[in-house]
Amino acid sequence: MRQNKGKELEFFNTLGEDQEYNVFTDEANAKIINTIIRLLKPSRHSPLVDLGCGSGIFTQLLASLGYECIGVDLSHTLLKRGKDQCPQLNFIQADVESLPFADNSIETIVLSCLVHHLPDPSQCIKELHRVLKPNGRFVAFDPNRLNPFMYLYRDRSSPFYSSKGVTENERPVLAKHLCNIFKKTGLTCLSTYVNGLSFRYVASAKGLLPIYNVIDKYAFMLPWMAPFRAFVFSSGSKVTDSV
């Protein structure tokens, strides 16, 4: 199944007319950035590309720490918000399945809550492999399907699934399955599970959000509960002898 790009564009362009799509709390955004930096180990001497940047929330936070960032997204409305907020940053409208970068040209890439929007991420990951330099590094973060809340609320097979606030393309990821796709494409892959990424808002069930945020922060703290945490960060590098 391929991503319905028309539906994706329609959803995020409409969304971008009203808001910047900053769904996490400031504390959670900081935790995401710290995890990205820890796993990616980006250099301040070469560009870092943020794929699926939206209005550039994470692009701007990384740039504020001294990294040279390029934001890439499909939605021109969200990108305009990013450009209005930070005109000094480089934002590019492009499809992640056909990136506007030369082969072996990018050292570090972030996929910002992007992969779960792709019913089949293989083409995006092939493009990631193509543009990464040898030994270039990536990190992707997405909702984890093994987390009971993410499954029950956001997976189409759940009897409690809510389609409000998401597109038909979205589905939480299975970390092992996703890592296998990265590996088959010539990339190494490690899964890191993160909890405590509190939401600022959700499109529905708003009255339950404070309860969810507390449970997510404390219920999955024990190491043996790690695979069930709400978000998984997939990270790795381009294998130098891959074809």
Image (spheres, grey):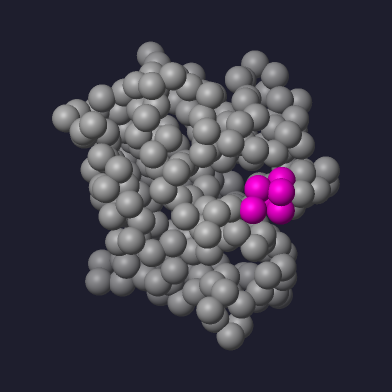
Q: Position of residue 164 (x, y in %)?
A: 72, 68
Q: Position of residue 123 (x, y in %)?
A: 45, 43
User: In this rendering, would 234 be left or right of 29?
Assistant: left
Between residue 73 and residue 16, name the one nearer to us.
73
- The part of the image, by quadrant, that contains residue 84 is top right
Residue 194 lies, with reference to residue 136, above or below; the image says below
Q: Residue at x 65, y 48 (%)?
A: 5
Q: Residue at x 39, y 27 (%)?
A: 131
Q: Residue furthest bottom?
A: 159
Q: Position of residue 53 (x, y in %)?
A: 58, 37
- The part of the image, by quadrant, that contains residue 203 is bottom right
- Residue stretch in magenta: 4-9
Question: Which corner quadrant holds the C terminus?
Answer: top left
Q: Main secondary structure of the magenta part?
A: helix
Between residue 220 and residue 47, name the one nearer to us.
47
Q: Position of residue 242 (x, y in %)?
A: 21, 33
Between residue 199 and residue 154, name the one nearer to us.
154
Q: Residue at x 24, y 28 (%)?
A: 135
> Can I make out residue 111 in this image?
yes
Magenta stretch contains residue 39: no
User: In this rendering, would 109 be left or right of 237?
Assistant: right
Q: Total label count?
A: 0
> Can I make out residue 41 in this image?
no
